[in-house]
Image: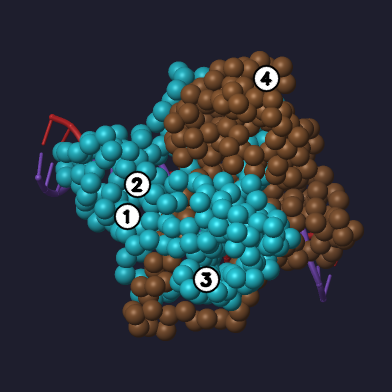
Chain colours: A brown, B cyan, C purple, D red
Amino acid sequence: MATGRTHRPATRSRGIPEATVARLPLYLRALTALSERSVPTVSSEELAAAAGVNSAKLRKDFSYLGSYGTRGVGYDVEYLVYQISRELGLTQDWPVVIVGIGNLGAALANYGGFASRGFRVAALIDADPNMAGKPVAGIPVQHTDELERIIQDNGVSIGVIATPAGAAQQVCDRLVAAGVTSILNFAPTVLSVPDGVDVRKVDLSIELQILAFHEQRKAGEEAAGEAAVPAAAGRGDSADQGPDGDVPAVMPA
Amino acid sequence: MATGRTHRPATRSRGIPEATVARLPLYLRALTALSERSVPTVSSEELAAAAGVNSAKLRKDFSYLGSYGTRGVGYDVEYLVYQISRELGLTQDWPVVIVGIGNLGAALANYGGFASRGFRVAALIDADPNMAGKPVAGIPVQHTDELERIIQDNGVSIGVIATPAGAAQQVCDRLVAAGVTSILNFAPTVLSVPDGVDVRKVDLSIELQILAFHEQRKAGEEAAGEAAVPAAAGRGDSADQGPDGDVPAVMPA
DNA sequence: CAGTGTGAACCGATTCACAGCG
DNA sequence: CGCTGTGAATCGGTTCACACTG
């Protein structure tokens, strides 16, 4: 869906399915953990369990990247870490700016997962003049007026929006005008962007609402007779942790 | 994917596709905005634009709920708000607990989107004794020791984990043992839970990594000749904002 | 012979296109 | 006549099952 129309119909050399791309970070995390424990190789079965997917899917995913395994043995952990990092573009480091330094923005700024993996928080930006200069996560907050200069000076192409919903579109427009081409949006709004700009959305309340839906189902089904809930032994580790599970949601808009 | 095996093979009365469920909150938000502006009816086209999806998908989605529209006219905003709220189970209100009151936990506690839509933050829980008693978003933080009691006293069935990765599984186990059956996990770990418990995951760094992948693609393709990037007129509002775009990711695990 | 790599079957979701209705 | 509702076509992704290989 997302990857809408006319998204590169040609130059279709190595087309990795979006669903696969969305899982690569998952594999990468699991592999990194193995790497830290100096595990040399893993089987698809083991790695799949660690990443929370099933092994057939994992093997299929890797087959899109190339044949990096050894039959009868498994995958070389270090090698795979490298290949996936490269595929995701994490061998270079990406400067990102975070706009909107409220609780959420601060949480993002402090989030270790960014710095550790190819991302560098180039600047924190907020509209509140009182915030200007204050350090958050060791980085001084700068005023929105500086936005364009910051983007350009640092060659930023990825922006994170953590502002209130009302400000999001305006911030988005300025980011895009200044040269940002990928946006991670935490504000609960639909952003409209020109063609060629990718937007991903993370929406906290939507996730809860989806859980509520399923929760309601569970409650309703107790009554509905039937041998409901087979209640197979606890701790069924195998199944998909369906991350965002999902489908990517990137769109040229 | 997520909705793995043997998930209610029977009692298949009103089966709403997971992909549709994941979009209902989106429609609901757009409808709420229209409702506040006292707009009485919308066409599928208009509503789809406001929600960031295409109209065919929206109509198909609504068709799973029933025939709530009027041909030649559109949908009644108020009525639809009610129907979707009911379908999502938001007419009742769900007490939730947030475990791990760091920056992220605090951001979640302050997040207006929860309280406004069927959710009530019943308690904030943190392992740090120094946090105990401190109010965050007007709610006093309680110590982890109280977790089981809090869950039971408040009949909490939905828990939010915003702890560091290392603590997540342990917290999860305790939540589940105390009776929680839906978990929203912000910690970058794969949680394993018994059958019948739903887990949804929100992972900040994964989203960025997916953006990086696409960003890298864009950079690479400039060189690769070809009439790349047709650059259709700016601000293409129609296309999917593919929210989490996604596929649900709920799993009985 | 254990475990990868992959064609083929399957399944759910999206899109198309138009019949049906207010 | 305009817009909904939906069967049919299509697409992308997942699962199956097994041939192949180190």
Residue topped by disc 3:
B151
Task: Please say if the residues under marks 4 and 3 sit with CB atoms less than 8 Å apart.
Answer: no
The numbered dot on residue B85 is: 1
x 60%, y 26%: residue: A130
Nearest to viewer (mark 4 / mark 3)? 3
* Residue A73 position by quadrant: bottom right
Within 10 Å of disc 3 (Cα), the crowding (few <14, some 14-19, many 20+) is many
Give the alpha-carbon distance from disc 3 to disc 1, as whole Å: 25 Å
Task: Please say if the residues under marks 1 and 2 sit with CB atoms less than 8 Å apart.
Answer: yes
* Element on which disc 4 rests: helix
x 52%, y 30%: residue: A252
| Chain letter for the residue marked with disc 2 in the picture | B
Give the residue type that dot 2 points to.
Leu
* Element on which disc 2 rests: helix
Residue topped by disc 2:
B28
Query: Which of the two residues, A58 or B14, is positioned nearer the viewer here?
Result: B14
Q: Are marks 3 and 2 on the same chain?
A: yes
x 86%, y 55%: residue: A36
* Element on which disc 1 rests: helix
Give the residue type that dot 1 points to.
Ser
Within 10 Å of disc 4 (Cα), the crowding (few <14, some 14-19, many 20+) is some
